[in-house]
Image (cartoon, grey):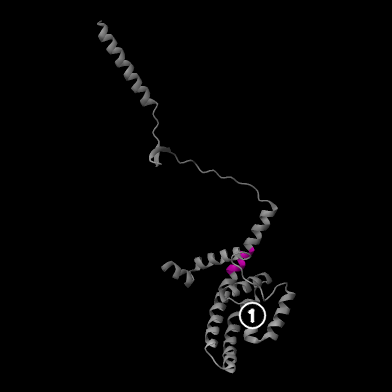
Amino acid sequence: MNPKKTITFALLLLGLGANAQSINDTLKVEAIMYNGEFVPFQNLESVSVMAKLTDEQRKRMSEYNRLRNAVYVTYPYARTAGVLLNDINDKIAKMDGRRDRKSYIRTREDELKREFTKPIKNLSTFQGKVLMKLINRETGNSCYEIIRDYRGGFVAGAYQTVAYFFKTSLKQPYDPQDEDAILERIVREVQSLYGYPEIARKAES
């Protein structure tokens, strides 16, 4: 055989072998563009990692669930009370005479009693504490301030004394940035879930 033909034939076989090897060694994978170049991409199966809660974690979860349940129960009442009380404040602010304001408050007081006497009686002490904080949130005033303005300082003081025996206070502040941050987050969850008007307005704006 011609030596040149032999060399050419050998090179041809080597080339075919190299191509065959490169084809067999190639794996097709998905790719994504990252920083201007394609890199291999693959979805991995999800892995669940589970561990037992510590006693402290269980305690915190129980406290959170208790608070969340209380907010879901009481926020509709706080919301309604806020609307009524803010409406009363708007009306009496436009009245000149003290007697006219007192008379108007008495007529609206009956409405408040009809709206809240029965449901409030069914609340637990803890739910009552949460409700007072939420009323503060909705009106900008503590329950003590509301009672003092509508019924006088003596009546407000008497209610505050009763509240003291239930280990609470009508003067509870509402601090959404610190002490009541978790409470505020749950309130916003309730608002988003039930579509309160101010949430709808924010979505439109």
Say which quarter of the image contains residue 24.
top left
Is 73 contained in the magenta span? no
Q: Which residues are magenta?
A: 66-72
Q: Is residue 13 above or below residue 139?
A: above
Q: Residue at x 59, y 92 (%)?
A: 98
Percent x, y of residue 26: 39, 29
Q: Quadrant of the C terminus?
A: bottom left
Which amino acid type is shown beneath numbered disc 1? Glu
The quarter of the rendered structure image containing the N terminus is top left
Q: Position of residue 29 (x, y in %)?
A: 40, 36
Q: Which residue lies at the image location 62% right of the left edge and 79% below the top edge? A: 118
Residue closest to the eye, 49 or 96: 96
Residue 131: x and y in percent read 62, 73
Magenta stretch: includes residue 70? yes
Tell me the residue at 67%/69% (across/down): 126
Q: Nearer the viewer, residue 46 or 151?
A: 151
Write down the residue under mark 1: 145
Q: Residue at x 65, y 48 (%)?
A: 52
